[in-house]
Amino acid sequence: MKKLFFLTILLSAVTAFADDAKNEWHNTVLTEATMKKIQEAKYDYRKCVVEEMKKPAYQQLESRKATEDLIKQCEPTLAKMREVYTEENVPGVVADRHLKQMRIQTTRTVLQELMFAEAARKAGQQ
């Protein structure tokens, strides 16, 4: 009975590992042209965020709501980077992980800046 239980656990672990292996990116090399496209898309995303932050409409909103709206406005720009990854046959899991990381970092930065600006306005400094 113990051997059957152990064998069942072992087979389920192997099956889970096999499923993860096909979603992994195995030492594929991106060309310089592809890297340049990714960097350009990243630049366009950050540029979109900065341009949106300059709009006075976001200054009137609460900082969390403004951050949410701002990030949503720039989402199509970020989607262009995913297209570059897809064209290069990068697994969707890997591409999505990188895009999620960028989105989270940008959201944190934007929220921090908008909260600072909101606090400054409330303190009468601006």
Image (cartoon, helix red, strand yellow):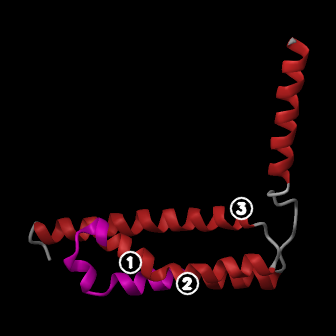
Crowd tier of the residue under label 3, counting other residues whose Cα lies within 10 Å: few below 14, some 14–19, many 20 or above: few
Please tell me whether mark 2 or mark 3 is closer to you in this view.
Answer: 3
Marks 3/1: CA distance? 25 Å
The quadrant holding residue 114 is: bottom left
Q: Which residue is mark 1?
A: 70
User: Which quadrant is the C terminus positioned in?
Assistant: bottom left
Q: Of all residues shown, which one is farthest toward the left?
A: 124
Magenta-drawn segment: 45-65
- Secondary structure found at label 3: helix
Horizontal relation, residue 81 to residue 3: left or right: left
Q: Upstream in the sequence, badge 2 or badge 3?
A: 2
Q: Of all residues shown, which one is farthest toward the top?
A: 1
Residue 30 position in % (x across, y down): 83, 74
- Secondary structure found at label 2: helix
The quadrant holding residue 100 is: bottom right
**Residue 48: which numbered mark, if any?**
none
The quadrant holding residue 92 is: bottom right
Q: Is residue 69 highlighted in magenta? A: no
Residue 16 position in % (x across, y down): 80, 42
Q: Which residue is mark 3?
A: 93
**Residue 77: which numbered mark, if any?**
2
Say which amino acid is labelled 1. Answer: Leu
Marks 1/2: CA distance? 12 Å
Whether label 1 touches label 2, CB < 8 Å: no
